[in-house]
Amino acid sequence: GDSVTQMEGPVTLSEEAFLTINCTYTATGYPSLFWYVQYPGEGLQLLLKATKADDKGSNKGFEATYRKETTSFHLEKGSVQVSDSAVYFCALMGSRSQGNLIFGKGTKLSVKP
Amino acid sequence: DAGVTQSPTHLIKTRGQQVTLRCSPKSGHDTVSWYQQALGQGPQFIFQYYEEEERQRGNFPDRFSGHQFPNYSSELNVNALLLGDSALYLCASSYRSGASYEQYFGPGTRLTVT
C-alpha cells in the first residue's frame, strides 16, 4: 500500500541555519504530496503542497519539490527561526483516494536562539 | 470564523467502556475525516463522512464507528475500549474531498484508556 517515510528526529538547529527534512514515498500512480506542521497544543496546519511531478510548493519561506524520479518531497528552508520549532509531517493523498491523507511519523524541529 | 472545534479536550476512560468524541467543522465545509494519532506517530486515517454517510474507511476495526449530522457535525464512537486506543483523535473538515480541497484540522481530543 501507499506509504510515507521521513527522516527521524529530533532535529536541533541554531537560528538562521539551513533546514532540510527528507521525505520519500511509495505510491501507485500520481499522488499529491503535502507538508503539515503541528505546533505544541495545536492541530495540524497545511504548510505547502504539490499535486504533480516537478511542482514546487512554497509557503512562509519553506519549499518542497515533487520529484517523481526519486519519489521524494524534501522540505527546505534557507534560514530557520525560533518560531519554526514544531513537528513537521510529510503526507500523501493517493491518486485514487477520495481524500484520506497518509502521514509519515513526523520530525520534531527545535530551533535555538 | 471559528475553525474546526472538537470536544472534549481530554478524556479518561477505563478498558471496556465506550466513548463518543465530537467535531464541528469549519463554516462552509461539508466533509469530515477522523484520524488517530498515537504518541510519537503520524495521524492514521479512520474514516470520512460526507452527506451523512461513511465515504471511505481506513484499517480500523468495527469498534470504531461514526455519524454525521445534517449540520455537518460529526461524532466518533469507540466501543470496548482497549489500552491501545489511547491517542490523540483529530477531526479534519473540508469542502468536498480530494487534493484540491484543503483539510483543516481541529486541536484534537486526547483519550487516555486505563
Image (cartoon, grey):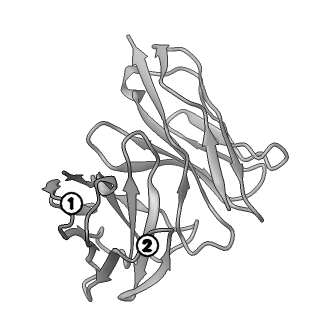
Asked if A99 appears above or below A77 in the picture, the reply is below
Q: Earlier in the sequence, mark 2 or mark 1?
A: 1
Mark linked to residue B47 = 2
Please state which amino acid type lies under the numbered disc 2: Phe
Asked if B26 appears above or below A7 in the picture, the reply is below
Q: Residue furthest right?
A: A69
Mark linked to residue B15 = 1
Q: Tell me which residue sits at (50%, 14%) in the image.
A: A16
Residue A67 placement: quadrant:
top right
* Residue B32 at x, y percent in the picture: 37, 73
In the displayed structure, does residue A70 sit left or right of residue B76?
right
Please state which amino acid type lies under the numbered disc 1: Arg
Q: Secondary structure at mark 2?
A: strand
**Tag 1: Cα neighbours inside 10 Å, few (<14), some, or many (≥20)?**
some
Q: Tell me which residue sits at (22%, 62%) in the image.
A: B5
In the displayed structure, does residue B32 sit left or right of residue B74?
right
The answer to whether residue B1 is visible is: no
Near-viewer residue (A111 or B114): B114
Near-viewer residue (A86 or B63): B63
The answer to the question of whether label 2 and label 1 lie on touching residues, with beta carbons closer than 8 A, is no
